[in-house]
Image (spheres, grey):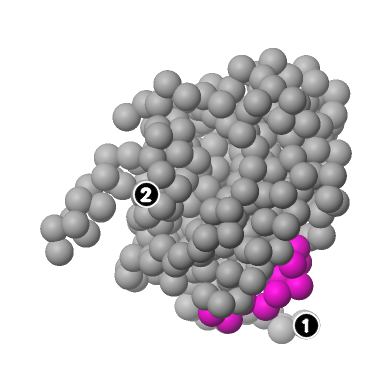
Amino acid sequence: MSSSQKLVVLGSINADHILTLEHFPHPGQTLSGRDYQIAFGGKGANQAVAAGRSGADIRFIACVGEDDIGQRMIEQFNKDRIDTQAVSPVQGQSTGVALIFVNAVAENCIGIFAGANACLSTDYVQQHANLIRSSNALLLQLETPLESIIEAAEIAQNSGVKVILNPAPARELPEALLRLVDIITPNETEALSLTGVIIHDEKDAAEAACILHSKGIKTVVITMGSRGVWLSESGQGQLVAGFKVNAVDTIAAGDTFNGAFVTALLEGKTALDAARFANAAAAIAVTRSGGQPSVPWREEIDAFLNAQTAL
């Protein structure tokens, strides 16, 4: 199902090197892995793929290296129904890399080398400003230069384009950026960085959401892993429960949620229905290995939700 509303995702592209271990290594310790794979990843790319496979009319603004894996990624994006006119190879740069450890209970820890992602400059954003202006929503994350993220958000806000920020990886953010955001989608760690609130339960989530509302953000969606998400609109919050599945790894679960959530909003779903749709997409993703390989297609999400309704 394709929406007539247009989405632009601006963000990172990485080659994920994923090693599965019994537990994370301690300093100085060497461990033998159980499984190793290279998968296409990066928060921007994962969210773009999630949106494309969910049915969004999507354009992606990003940079890859002048290398074989970058070219193969662009080819894959096209298969994932993503318009790649604004995805460019950068001369003399390598495609970004993420080194990922996954432990026996499906948790992960990640180290990133930006590579070509660091070349997503304000000038690059301006080159593609008309793509942003002609869209209905702009989805952002924090793996590309902050000044470029702010630039893109300003272009969007000045054009009446809805700005959705997934504030990941966790960091403090300037008020100048938060003022431009319509919807923010932190996880518990990211919410702590932005609000100082440790989220143990729904009461804590509501408190964190209120702080983010006070910064001018209308809709706050705090992802809480298997529990689901805390959805707060103009101060009115509720838990949208997650779905029980057997998790293999959680890589790209949050990214899958974000891409699917924005897609559903652009189709005219309420934020509540969009959150439930995105919870379903993320639930499917955690039952599979890797970043983009784990992201489900629209038909799978619809079938999953239909099966839940039938229970």
Residue drawn at point x = 52 percent, y = 68 percent: 224
What residue occupies the far front of the structure in this picture?
A: 235
Residue 260 picture location, percent across and down: 45, 44
Q: Is residue 91 above or below residue 95?
A: above
Q: Secondary structure at mark 1?
A: loop
Residue drawn at point x = 76 percent, y = 72 percent: 196
Judge from the rendering whether residue 193 lies leftward or rightward of residue 208; answer left or right. right
Residue 187 picture location, percent across and down: 60, 63
Q: Is residue 266 above or below residue 278?
A: above
Q: Nearer the viewer, residue 10 or 172?
A: 172
State which region is magenta: 190-201
Q: Is residue 30 above or below residue 59?
A: below
Q: Nearer the viewer, mark 1 or mark 2?
A: 2
Cα separation between marks 1 and 2: 47 Å
Residue 232: image quadrant is: bottom right
Which quarter of the rendering shows the C terminus? bottom left
Q: Is residue 198 magenta?
A: yes
**Comes first in the chain, label 1 or label 2:** 1
Q: Residues within 10 Å of mark 1 (few under 14, many from 20)?
A: few
Residue drawn at point x = 67 percent, y = 78 percent: 198
Which amino acid lies under the numbered mark 1 shown in the image of this protein?
Gly
Residue drawn at point x = 75 percent, y = 63 percent: 194
Q: Is residue 131 above or below residue 34?
A: above
Mark 2 = which residue? 273
Residue 197 visible from this viewpoint: yes
Q: Nearer the viewer, residue 19 or 285?
A: 285
Q: Are marks 1 and 2 in contact (CB under 8 Å)?
A: no
Which amino acid lies under the numbered mark 2 shown in the image of this protein?
Asp
Determine which of the numbered discs, if any, sits on residue 28 in the image.
1
Residue 244: image quadrant is: bottom left
Q: Secondary structure at mark 2?
A: helix
What residue occupies the far left of the structure in this picture?
A: 310
